[in-house]
Image (spheres, helix red, strand yellow):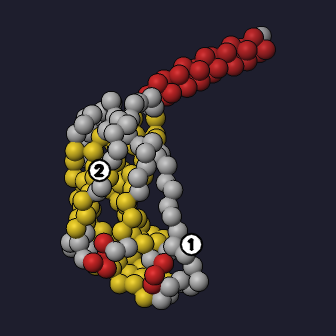
Amino acid sequence: MSTTLMSFVIAAVALCTGTLNALGEEDCAFTVSTRQRPQPAVTGPDDVISRLLILEQPDSPVFVAGADFSGFQLNASDGYVSYEGPYTVDIVNRSDKTVPAVHVVMRVRNALAGGGNGRTLDRALAPGERATIVVNGGPGRSTGSFTSDEVRVVVNVEVLRFDLCEYRPSQAIPLPRTR
């Protein structure tokens, strides 16, 4: 009797798992526009803009179309970096599917590590729609064995959430040449 019950439980779990996998795979299916992403529009202090890298992420249904770091402060020297202040990130849905949740991040990093913050858009983003995410970037700092030339401000789409799928776009980050 217990063998029959165990077989039933295993069959039920397998059936449910198969159904969830099928739903999750379908939920993660989307078509991304093949149009080339326009050059992102960026504004802010020269010391931030000269270090800014907005990742291309060609596999992402949502791309970063621009960023405004006008209220952001960055202090970088050999072995030390600090940052704080608000910034905005403009995003565009280039897919054929509404995206219920998009999380973008900004990281101040060197060749080895980094820290930062981000925010999730507080509404769904329809195909072709543009939105602005406002981030009140708290203070951050880092010390270590790096030069000020290695410090980069990196902005990217971190994660997209659909009903039964969490999608993380590619994140190829070119590293600065080190000593």
Q: Position of residue 29 (x, y in %)?
A: 45, 29
Which structural element holds mark 2? loop
Instruction: Work out whether 10 lies above or below 152.
Output: above
- Using a 10 Å C-alpha cutoff, classify the residue at mark 1 as few (fewer than 14 neighbours), some (14 to 19) or many (20 or more): few
User: Given the image, on which type of amino acid does mark 2 rest?
Assistant: Pro
Q: Position of residue 37 (x, y in %)?
A: 33, 47
Q: Position of residue 145 (x, y in %)?
A: 56, 85
Q: Is residue 115 left or right of residue 122?
A: right
| Rendered residue at 67%/15% (across/down) | 11
Q: Quadrant of the N terminus?
A: top right
Quadrant housing residue 82: bottom left
| Rendered residue at 63%/21% (across/down) | 13
Residue nearer the viewer, 25 or 78: 78
Residue nearer the viewer, 164 or 90: 90
Ranked by sequence position, the earlier of labels 1 and 2 is 2
| Rendered residue at 32%/52% (across/down) | 64
Which structural element holds mark 1? loop
Residue nearer the viewer, 87 or 92: 92
Disc sitting over residue 145 in the figure: none
Q: Quadrant of the C terminus?
A: bottom right
- Using a 10 Å C-alpha cutoff, classify the residue at mark 2 as few (fewer than 14 neighbours), some (14 to 19) or many (20 or more): few
Is residue 120 among what the camera can see? no
Give the residue at mark 1: 112
Residue nearer the viewer, 49 or 24: 49
Q: Position of residue 18 (x, y in %)?
A: 59, 21
Q: Nearer the viewer, mark 1 or mark 2?
A: 2
Quadrant housing residue 117: bottom left
Task: Give the alpha-carbon distance from disc 1 to disc 2, as whole Å.
Answer: 29 Å
Give the residue at mark 2: 38
Q: Is residue 112 left or right of residue 87?
A: right
